[in-house]
Amino acid sequence: MPTATVSTRVPAYLALNLGFLLLVVAMALLGGAPNPRLPHMILLFAVCTTWILNFDRLNGPYALLALFQSFYFVSFGLLDVTNLLNGTSAELENSLYSATEGVVLAGAVMLTLGYQLGIRLATSRRGSRVALDWPVPSVLTAGLVIWAVGTVSMFYWGVFVVTDTTIETTRIALNRLSPYAIAGNLLAGMLQPVGILLIAYARLKLRSPLLLTLVIVMVLIQVVLGFVINGKSQAMIAGILVIITAIFVEGRIPKAWVAAGILFAYVGFPILQASRVEVHGERQVARSEILSNLGTNLMLAIEAKARLSKGPDKTQSLLERTSVRGSLQMVVENTGATVPFQHGYTMLPLLYTFIPKLVLADKISIPTGQLVNKEFHVSEYADTYISPSILGELYWNFGWYGVFGGMTIIGLLVGYLGGRFDMSRTPTVTGLLVLVLTTKQVIVAFEGTIAPEYVVWMRLLAAVGILHLLFARVPVADRRAAEDGVDAPEPAAAAPEPTGGGPRLPLAAPGSLGLSSGAPFPNLLR
């Protein structure tokens, strides 16, 4: 690593942490919190910003670590920071450090160490392989087909099969359909984000105004889909994927898209929250009726938003929805005392990841969120889903061993993929799919439960591997090999000329995406 780069990053890291220390001390004094938990906040922030010490490019090998550590802090620490001004605290005891805080900090440390190990494993054989990309026509065609089929399937499933939000309706619908129909709909819905990614990638490669229009329409359709089927994640996923695609492929922040995303989080997310309570909840409007009278039901949600923004009926903010510290604290304080350890029971579905239900009809399925509700006596309703977070589930199963071992393994896997698919060197469709699907299923879904998220993740990566074998034909040069003094493998010897798969992509010269070798954070904004 160049000395100039290190000398820039270390002061930046120290200055950021000094600024954070002064901020939380000032907030604690202003809020008058009796138990502000400042040591934990300061230490957690220090660990969750260590990505700065290695970070050089937005789409470099440490991009996933920056995302993971940032999301980790939002999930377990940011709400504590904002509560300082309210004079409130998550901890009742005045101990210097609580068990919950110890679990959070240990998880962050082991995640970081595991990631660093994964990076080293991935880069040990960097000069011995050739990256291959898809021809752009194949990318666009596959993206359109996958997205169209997936979107139609999700509309059909969410509007005409599962017609409302009740558990009983879902059970009736599942009993009415054949296993093949269920599997087909689930597969189409699972692959739909892949279609979005492929279209967004093709748009960046071709720079076509028509494709830009298509991407915008696709994002709007996804918002409507989320509103109709009561899915906030479905409403936001297309816009998020478009932003992440630009960051990973071009190494820059798409300012217009980010501004639109912030505006949607401020305006659109509360409307979706209000719709869940008013339209889908209290009124129990059928989803087909919501779709046919979209404007009327949108106005109902907007009117409910004003009522639900304050008072006893106030819905949770986006930050409150993102924070899982409360459920983790419940798990840590009660496991081993009033609730038994699971000893790996909730992770058993991982063993059956690649065995379809059509082959093994009675394969194990564990509703972890409902099990948490039952074991920890959260709600009297058996169907209530309580997420323990991935970190909480690791502790619930194996205690401290789960935190140290599990978070190290997760960090290692994510770090290996971050180093193996370094988009600042060889931007490819396969690399993009692997990194974004890992971001979605491992990082963003860290608030969820292990088996559902990791089973989908492994299946999607397997599907990406198959697609890579089918379509990857165009060799891509290593853009940074010359900077590192490494002889890049000869691309022409790696793969034959594509036959009928579309034109060969031009090889980009180093720096063609605005990445210079002199500055530690080159051309992040354009």
Image: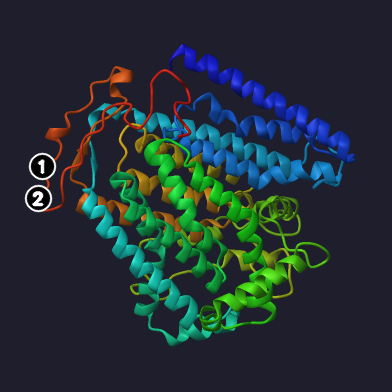
Secondary structure under tag 1 reads: loop
- Dot 2: element: loop
Residue extending furthest toward the top: 3
Q: Identify the residue under disc 2.
A: 499
Q: Where's residue 519, x and y in %?
A: 45, 20
Apparent side of residue 470 relative to residue 254 in the rendered image (left or right): left
Q: Is residue 198 visible?
A: no
Q: Is label 1 or label 2 in front?
A: 2
Number of numbered discs:
2
Disc 1 versus disc 2: distance between alpha carbons? 9 Å
Label drawn at residue 508:
none
Q: Where residue 150 appears, x then y in whole percent?
A: 37, 68
The answer, for residue 375, to whether it is visible in the render is: yes
Q: Position of residue 306 (x, y in %)?
A: 75, 66
- 510 vs 299, nearest the viewer: 299
Q: Position of residue 103 (x, y in %)?
A: 67, 42
Q: Quadrant of residue 303?
A: bottom right
- For badge 1, the amino acid type reads Pro
146 versus 525 height, above or below: below
Indicate the amino acid at tag 2: Thr
CB contact under 8 Å: marks 1 and 2: yes
- Classify the position of the C terminus by image quarter: top left
Which residue matches tag 1? 496
Report the residue at 28% width, 47% height from top: 206
The residue that appears at 46% across and 60% down in the rendered structure is 219
Q: Is residue 365 left or right of residue 100?
A: left
> Which quadrant is the N terminus positioned in?
top left
Vertical position of residue 344 compared to residue 121: above or below = below
